[in-house]
Image (tube, rainbow, N blue to C red):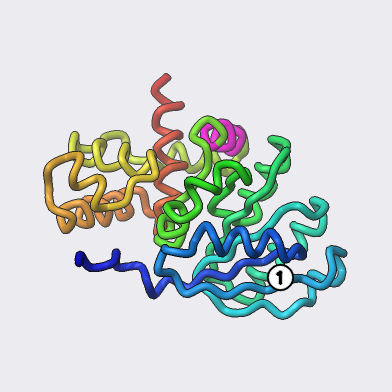
């Protein structure tokens, strides 16, 4: 029997006021090998969610069925208690402005309930590794909205003017939410080589996270359009 993927140590915490939603999330991750805990929230009121105790985990899956203010309060609570946590939000009928707000607050992944059925188990390791799991069209519009700010214009001016062909290829893979191994398979190079190029990209752009690479990639494209 082949070995399970090396992700069994990934600690995932599920948060929802609805027991049936928690059960569905658990079912979707049943064969993932993740270490899963869940917490049923006793209230959907923002003041209560700001003070609720949050179990420690690497990635949090937040049911966004509650009101926007309540979801924001819960997210703030998670990131206040666990600053290095990664958060994925699952919900339906999220308006574009709401999605932008979630991304600005620090959310790294957004899925609809329907998409979660197929993508949740694949998205969580990517988010845990520092990536972003958001529809590309939505991410593009979000980045464009950032580029219109003074900070975006400053970052664009600071970005390197050129990247090597291989760095561009690796960066394109990261933009598509590919893991290092997937990038390596696509380019027919070793995973260690991909990590080397990712490290170089981070250094060239002066950032620490892959999410920032995505932002700066869009900045380069905008500057050359």
Q: Residue at x 57, y 72 (%)?
A: 83
Name the residue nearer the viewer: 14 or 152.
14
Vertical position of residue 186 compared to residue 67: above or below: above
Q: Quick check: 113 above or below 43?
A: above
Q: Residue furthest front?
A: 1
**197 in the magenta segment:** no
Q: Is residue 44 left or right of residue 135?
A: right
Please name the residue shown 70% across and 42% down the image.
92
- On whether residue 142 falls in the magenta region, the answer is yes
Q: Is residue 74 above or below residue 187?
A: below
- Which residue is drawn at the image coordinates 43% and 41% (left, top)? 216
Graded by Cα atoms within 10 Å as few (under 14), some (14 to 19) or many (20 or more), the crowding at tag 1 reads some
Secondary structure found at label 1 = helix
Query: Magenta span: helix, strand or loop, mainly?
Result: helix
**What stretch of residues is rendered in magenta?**
139-148
Q: Position of residue 205 (x, y in %)?
A: 35, 48
Q: Which residue is mark 1?
A: 77
* Image quarter in which the C terminus is found: top left
């Amino acid at each position: 029997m082949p070995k399970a993927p090396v992700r069994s140590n990934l600690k995932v915490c599920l948060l929802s006021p609805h027991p049936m939603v928690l059960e569905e999330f658990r079912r979707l991750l049943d064969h993932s090998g993740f270490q899963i805990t869940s917490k049923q929230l006793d209230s959907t009121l923002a003041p209560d969610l700001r003070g609720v105790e949050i179990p420690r985990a690497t990635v949090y899956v937040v049911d966004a069925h509650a009101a926007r203010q309540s979801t924001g309060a819960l997210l703030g609570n998670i990131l206040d208690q666990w600053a290095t946590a990664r958060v994925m939000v699952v919900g339906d009928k999220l308006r574009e402005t709401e999605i932008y707000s979630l991304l600005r607050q620090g959310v790294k992944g957004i899925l609809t309930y329907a998409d979660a059925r197929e993508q949740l188990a694949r998205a969580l390791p990517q988010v845990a590794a520092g990536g972003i799991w958001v529809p590309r069209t939505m991410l593009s519009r979000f980045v464009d909205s950032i580029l219109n700010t003074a900070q975006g214009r400053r970052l664009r001016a600071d970005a390197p003017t050129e990247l090597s062909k291989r760095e561009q290829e690796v960066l394109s893979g990261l933009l598509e939410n590919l893991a290092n191994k997937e990038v390596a398979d696509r380019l027919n190079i070793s995973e260690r080589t991909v990590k080397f190029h990712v490290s170089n990209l981070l250094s060239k752009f002066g950032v620490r996270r892959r999410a920032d690479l995505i932002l700066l990639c869009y900045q380069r494209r905008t500057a050359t359009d």
